[in-house]
Amino acid sequence: MCILTLVERKHLKNMVHVRLLVMMHILIIYSTFGAVRRPINIRVLEGNSCDTPQVIGGKCMNISLCDPAFVHSIAYQEHTPVCQQNAFYRVICCQPFLDFCENSKQFQIMHGIEAEPGMFPHLARLGLKSEEDGIAWTCSANIISERFLLTAAHCNPVNIAGLGCAESMQCDQQNTVKSFISNPKYKTSFKYHDIALVELEQNIRFNKRVLPICPYISKTDLHESEDLVIAGWGATESHFQSPRLMFATVRTVLQNDCKDHYASLLKASPNKKLHQGITDEMYCAQGALVDNVTEYIDACSGDSGGPLQTKQNNNLYLIGVISTGFGCGSSSPGLYTRVASYFGWIKETVSATRDN
């Protein structure tokens, strides 16, 4: 017979307790991330860069340090991108929120140029689909993640999104709109805070023609000499709506100059929708005066929700969402909702939606 002392019994009890805790942690890890979802073990050390079918240009890091929004997005995938793991420690191929993009009244483009195939893979179309009339495309939007688009709040209502539509009226992918989330400060009777998130029912299938765009998160105006690009399917000078994606070059109008211009304009022609004048949440831009025409390159009807974008370090960045103006192709700067002013709201809303 083996007789244990009181100290030995206490030690044995502690060992059993520790083993139970270990088993509980193992069960939690596998139930959350993975026995069912097969991991892709890419055998890359913590801190090194990594690439997987789901993640391009990621970084290997402990799952506890990875952005919660990204962790939620991979938790439901069939394959989890794992760099290293054991029963107590998991290192995954992680990306900061929205960084996947780096790998990759309604308004229209006046005096624009037809876009080449795949030139703007982040650009989507929004519309209303019915059994009687088919799809009526009404707005544009910008892909910012695998499930979300960014557009103008005044584009609501919509119930269908088209992706990869650049070359014709047909789109490579169609996705049902699950929810349209306008910024809480937006009011339909005014032209302020004109920005919204569109949540899709299904994850987007990324390819060379369908990719997200990076938000430009600096609130500083770009230099007046720097070319910016607007794009959309809106009306042109010769058609009510362009059958093909068009783009045009515009340049920044500095905030103070824009405020002064609209202050004079609104004094002469008051507009209740712009009763506060130009605010810091808006971005102003204007195209060149077209030769032999008394119109400026501009966004107009049908382009709403589309991008004002810049190219830096071989990546496109979304500066603004096409919102409003004072007439198509007029001498007044076009008004865009400044994405940087709403980046915190965008990130919080997407993360909160994924948590539900």
Image (spheres, rainbow, N blue to C red):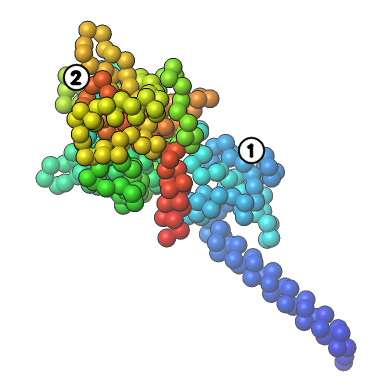
Amino acid type at image mark 2: Glu
Q: Nearer the viewer, residue 250 or 356?
A: 250
- Residue lying at 58% horizontally and 45% vertically, measured from the top left: 94
Above or below for 75 versus 271: below
What percent of the width, then of the height, locates residue 276? 30, 39
| Disc 1 from disc 2: Cα separation | 48 Å
Question: Is 272 displayed left or right of 333 in the figure?
Answer: left
Picture quarter with the C terminus: bottom left
Q: Secondary structure at mark 1?
A: strand
| Residue denoted by label 2 | 237
Kindly indicate the quadrant of the structure image that contains residue 232.
top left
| Most foreground residue, 128 or 29 | 128
- Residue for point 14% across, 47% down: 131
Q: For the point 44% across and 38% down, which residue is it?
A: 340
**Three-letter code for the amino acid on which mark 1 is drawn:** Ser
Q: Depth-wise, is mark 1 or mark 2 nearer the camera?
A: 2
